[in-house]
Image (spheres, grey):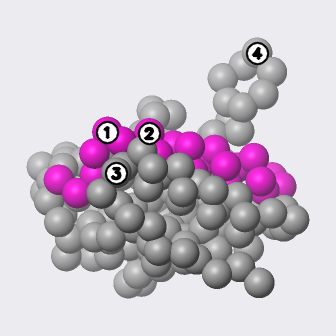
Amino acid sequence: MFEAVPVDASDPLRFHAELDRQLRALIAGERDRIANAANASALIFQLVPGLNWAGFYFLHTERELVVGPFQGKPACVRIAVGKGVCGAAAQRRQSIVVEDVHAFPGHIACDAASRSELVVPLIREGGTEPGTVLGVLDLDSPLPGRFSEADRIGFERLAATYVAGSDW
């Protein structure tokens, strides 16, 4: 049985390497994307300090994301691609770090306590074409400026681990 081990967050590189290692151990032998997303969101929410929401939105159609497994308050169910931080990250095919969600044009407030956000697109790489966007990993914090460049890089690696370890 897997048991999450607390991680010292004072060194961001070590923190994210250990978080990725624990996710790999957690999803080893399981390929179901929903089960893996549920466990990944629980692991992130348990080990990453300063979060009030951690979860996934999956691309339901080429124009719409639909909420998947998450930890935190109830969430917006459907987000149009291109709308809010999640929709913008899916459309741009790149991570977005928002220091103050109130300054992000078109921010969708599912939890009024959220002040900063990091959204990482889930991209399946392959072939010579750009990768396919499958959805996004969304992290919210009640702390302004919670997410750093090291967080962006670390969660991009974590998202890649999740995508590679799950069947699509």
Residue named by callout 2: 153
Identify which amino acid the numbered label 2 is placed on.
Ile
Q: Say left or right for 79 vs 42.
A: left
For residue 109: magenta? Answer: no
In the displayed structure, would residue 86 be above or below residue 55? above
Identify which amino acid the numbered label 3 is placed on.
Asp
Q: How crowded is the residue under tag 3: few (<14 C-alpha within 10 Å), some, or many (20+)?
A: few
- In front of the other: label 1 or label 4? 1
Mark identifier at residue 11? 3
User: What's drawn in magenta, residue-wise?
Assistant: 145-168
Mark identifier at residue 149? 1
Q: Residue at 58% x, 49% y: name it.
A: 159
Q: Say left or right for 15 vs 115.
A: right
Alpha-carbon distance for marks 1 and 4?
A: 28 Å
Determine the residue located farthest toward the top in the rendered image: 128
Q: How crowded is the residue under tag 4: few (<14 C-alpha within 10 Å), some, or many (20+)?
A: few
Give the mark nearest the N terminus, 3 or 2.
Answer: 3
